[in-house]
Amino acid sequence: MGELAARIAAVKERIAAAAARSGREPEEIELIAVTKTVEVPRIREAIVAGITCLGENRVQELTAKYREIGQEVEWHLIGHLQTNKVKYIVDKVALVHSLDRLSLARELNKRALACERAVPVLVQVNIAEEESKFGLHQDEVLPFLKQIQSMDGLKVQGLMTIAPFTEEPETVRPVFRALSRLAGEIADLGLPGVEMRYLSMGMTNDFEVAIEEGANMVRIGSAIFGERS
Ligand SMILES: *Cc1c(COP(=O)(O)O)cnc(C)c1O
């Protein structure tokens, strides 16, 4: 097995173990391989090793790689999305993880309807209320969903958060628990047009704790591709 395939296998084992601790099957957790700054040949190697979903945080990088790799994988936009760049990705992405404001919802909706699709989206929540991070505060999520639920060009599929960076993942467990609880409360309301299928939370430093708290989509970069320079 090559070095990259071995790293992927190791990550998948850790995902499976964390899933088991939360009473779930490994297949219930979707692995998004975060490929920002990773060159196409190495991405292709990861695809050969079984990666099926790629996460990019910049539109320009996503579209450049999309031109080379195309639809053989799912493309996930995981970073902040500028409204004027929506048109470049609306027909390419399987999921936008970073819907965080009404102006972006309106633009995504408009562009999606123009190409006769509904774009799957997650609402990004800034649970820890860090100044440096995008995302709605917890108490803004429900009013926001009510504003966007009738937009036919959007398919709300769940919530996403980025926990504060820490060497000690236990310290961010409450962040993941809070996002899980919020998703559960929203699901219980049964809002038409709003699904809570996905909880996108957990990165290299904290994905096991995120899974234990209910994540079913983890976004992992450096544990697969090594440290970014
Ligand atoms: C870079 C990035 C990740 C992956 O980070 P790692 O710590 O390398 O796993 C996950 N989510 C988002 C939004 C990112 O920008």
Image (cartoon, rainbow, N blue to C red):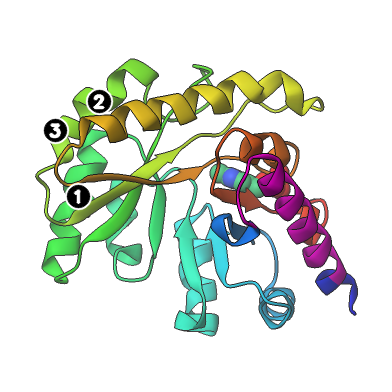
Quadrant in the picture for the N terminus? bottom right
- Disc 2 target residue: 142
At a point 68% along the width and 80% down the height, the residue shown is: 44
What's under tag 3, amino acid-wise?
Gln
What's under tag 2, amino acid-wise?
Leu
Q: Is residue 166 left or right of residue 187?
A: right
Q: Using the image, determine if residue 62 lies above or below residue 153.
A: below
Q: Nearer the viewer, mark 2 or mark 1?
A: 2
**Proximity of marks 3 and 2: CB atoms separated by less than 8 Å:** no
Instruction: Please state the extent of the stretch shown in magenta in the rendering.
Output: 6-25
Q: Which mark is residue 147?
A: 3
At a point 50% along the width and 54% down the height, the residue shown is: 58
Q: Which mark is residue 107?
A: 1
Q: CA distance from mark 2 to mark 1?
A: 20 Å
Quadrant of residue 132 within the rendered picture? top right
Q: CA distance from mark 3 to mark 1?
A: 14 Å
What's under tag 1, amino acid-wise?
Glu
